[in-house]
Amino acid sequence: MSEWTVVLGRLKQNGSNQFEVSLNVVNISMSNLTRNNIAVLKLSSKPTLNNYIQPICLDNKRTFPVGSICWAAGWSSGRGGEEQALQQFQATVVDCGDAATTDSMCTATFTLEQGDSGGPLMCKQGNSWFQPVVLHLVKTSNKTKRADPMMTFEKLVRFQSFLTSTLGTFLSPASTNMTTSGVPISHPSFFLLGHLLLFALCLQAFT
């Protein structure tokens, strides 16, 4: 753990980041399922929230209907100009068709490269943002009778038991926004201030 540092609030890989905060990692918990796995990093302290550092709710078995607009973000090589600014990508939820399972979520294809892997797919419902998926590179699928390809991701609900045992009970998001330092946020159920979630298979991308 002493070799790990998490950087929050970074907007540019090159150039100044006045809201950037670095925190040490004090514990790493990893799931142990077949196929992909995730890890939860416990940080040395809770970060101060601002416009650039915000919590997000775990999806906790929520459904995001076909047509929902979600977002991803990343720093893939060659994008974001000279300063390599953080890029955002829009993703539309689609019907998984033959690939549908309780653990899957499908979107229309969008640009996802190695530098984006391990990041969240972020979807908004009401006043709260939710993370149903940790992004990883997948092959696009052309299903029978589908005019457009899609991307299939494993939902975090697959890791529900691990997350519950590691983080405790998930609380329901509030119906109204609360404020910290003048910044609107959605409380509680944010996937714990002081913890960071990522795909274990993508750990090397963050060292």
Image: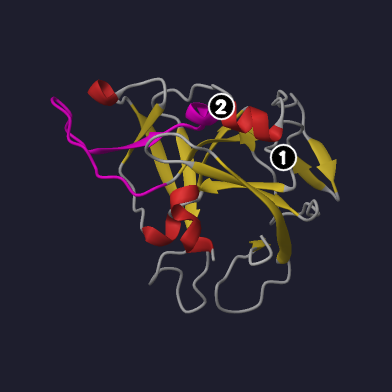
Which residue is at 30% across, 45% downward? 138
Residues at circles 2 and 1 in contact by the CB criterion of under 8 Å: no
SS assignment for the magenta stretch, majority: loop
In the image, residue 113 lies in the stretch drawn in magenta = no
Instruction: Indicate which label's residue lies in the foreground, 2 or 1.
Output: 2
Q: Earlier in the sequence, mark 2 or mark 1?
A: 2
Q: Is residue 189 above or below residue 202?
A: above
Relative to 37, 197 lies left or right: right
In the picture, the quarter occupied by the N terminus is bottom right
Q: Position of residue 90 (x, y in %)?
A: 43, 46
The residue depicted at 16 percent of the width and 33 percent of the height is 147
Residue 104 is situated, as x and y percent measured from the top left of the image, at 38, 28
Given the current orientation, which residue lies at the most extreme right position? 181
Alpha carbon of mark 2 to alpha carbon of mark 1: how far? 15 Å
Q: Identify the residue under disc 1.
A: 192
Q: Quadrant of the C terminus?
A: bottom right
Q: Is residue 59 visible?
A: no
Q: Residue 112 appears at what percent x and percent y?
A: 36, 53
Residue 70: assigned label: none
Determine crowd level at label 1: few under 14, some 14-19, many 20+ residues with C-alpha closer than 10 A. Answer: some
Q: Identify which amino acid the numbered label 2 is placed on.
A: Gln
Inspect the image, locate mark 1, and give the three-letter code of the amino acid beneath it.
Leu
Asked if residue 181 lies left or right of residue 172, the reply is right
Residue reaching furthest to the left:
144
Q: Is residue 15 left or right of residue 110?
A: right
* Residue 154 drawn in magenta: yes
Residue 167 versus residue 170 in the image, above or below: below
Q: Magenta stretch?
A: 136-160
Give the secondary structure at mark 1: loop
Residue that mark 2 sits on: 160
